[in-house]
Image (cartoon, grey):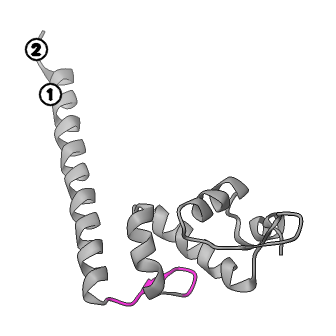
Amino acid sequence: MLIGELVERTGVSARSLRYYEEQGLLAPERSGNGYRVFDDADVVVAQQIRGLIEAGFGTEIIAQLLPCARGTAPEIELCPSVVAAMTRVLAEIEERHRDLGRRRDTVRALLTSDR
């Protein structure tokens, strides 16, 4: 299938699909005229990548997680290297959450302080 059909089947934009290829996450064949040709397995992989990006993973970590991904959600087989990568991402998310809480508290204090 060409990129337009993959866009239709996955809801992932053509720009994102080209980025996934650039990052080595998708590897479509090329036709004689240079068009990208995807297969049915790429539908699942594109959905897995999108789900992992939405969860907050960067493409370097996604490259590590994809071999362990199952289904379109995706579910991840928790081998030790995957657990370590996911733990790092979770720690980063939690730190951003704490930072936002501190910022919120500062703004609140400024709004309620006596002038």
Find residue 109 and report its image quarter.
top left
Of residues 102 and 5, which is closer to you in this image? Answer: 5
Disc marking residue 114: 2
Image quadrant containing the N terminus = bottom right
Q: Which residues are magenta?
A: 71-78
The residue pinned by badge 1 equals 109
Residue 72: image x %, image y %?
58, 81
Mark 2 and mark 1 lie on one chain; the one further toward the N terminus is: 1
Left of 96 or right of it: where is 44? right
Residue type of the residue flagged with mark 2? Asp
Foreground tag (2 vs 1): 1
Residue 6: image x %, image y %?
76, 70
Disc 1, SS? helix
Disc 2, SS? loop
The residue positioned farthest toward the left in the image shown: 114
State the predominant SS element of the stretch in magenta. loop
Residue 39: image x %, image y %?
75, 82
Residue type of the residue flagged with mark 1? Ala
Of residues 19 and 100, which is closer to you in this image? Answer: 19
Q: Residues within 10 Å of mark 2 (few under 14, many from 20)?
A: few
